[in-house]
Image (tube, rainbow, N blue to C red):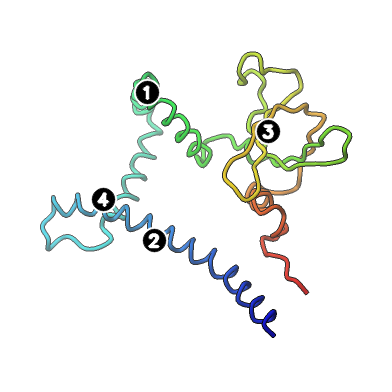
Amino acid sequence: MLKFISRNILTGFVTILPVALTIYFLYWIIISVESVLGSMIQSILPDVLYWPGIGLIAALAMAFAVGLLMHAYVVQQLFAMGEQILYRMPFINSVYKAIRDFFQYFSPTSKKEFEQVVAISIGDTGMKVIGFVTQAVMERLPEGFQEEDSILVYLPLSYMIGGYAVLVPRSAVRPLDMNMEEAMRFTLTAGVTGTSGTPYARK
């Protein structure tokens, strides 16, 4: 009886916590944006014209306007000049490049090579690991790290943030019929969720 109760309590937590944490994360983003931009707008507008949520709407409008402006050649050049200034600043350039590369993946205009999910064979052991192709063009790799018929693959670690970028021969790589979201979820949970994203139920 006690085992039955504890198992159902654990199942309840496994079901509720992902939903609750996702909702809390979205709530935290909305509150943070509203707190920063809302207070700025409130200091400009009269109290009569301010209403809760105007900061979030202003953030969405600002992002939309910047997205439109980035289609203009002049704005692109000005933005590139600003980036060059950041690239010349010690420490700041490393932080900015890391953050920019991360968010650049979500850009709708970027080439989504990272979404190519592959299985890598480890020697003659018969073992395989799941990875994501991050760089398939040899010329874009650092000097001394360019090998013919090789690609760079990111191997995420299970149950933690991080992973390894490894250079592997194309002959050791086999494409998988999985999208990036399914493969990332499957790998980070060490396969516990399966490919459907639902934890296996114990009989």
Question: Depth-wise, is mark 3 or mark 1 nearer the camera?
Answer: 3
Please, is residue 96 above or below residue 157 in the view? above
Q: Is residue 116 left or right of residue 28?
A: right
Please, is residue 80 above or below residue 32 in the view? above
Provide residue 200's location: percent of width, then percent of height.
73, 66
Query: Mark 1 highlights which residue?
Result: 77
- Give, as a three-letter code, the residue at label 2: Tyr
> Measuring 87% from the left and 40% from the top, which residue is drawn there?
126
Sequence-wise, which precedes: disc 3 or disc 1?
Answer: 1
Sequence-wise, which precedes: disc 3 or disc 2?
Answer: 2
The quarter of the image holding the C terminus is bottom right
Q: Is residue 89 left or right of residue 136?
A: left
Please, is residue 53 above or below residue 124 in the view? below
Q: CA distance from mark 1 to mark 4?
A: 29 Å
- Give, as a three-letter code, the residue at label 4: Val
Query: Mark 3 highlights which residue?
Result: 153
Q: CA distance from mark 3 to mark 4?
A: 39 Å
Sequence-wise, which precedes: disc 4 or disc 2?
Answer: 2
> Measuring 15% from the left and 60% from the top, which residue is drawn there?
49
Towards the viewer: 126 or 135: 126
Disc number for residue 36: 4
Please, is residue 53 above or below residue 172 in the view? below
- Give, as a three-letter code, the residue at label 3: Val
> Measuring 52% from the left and 66% from the top, which residue is drawn there?
19
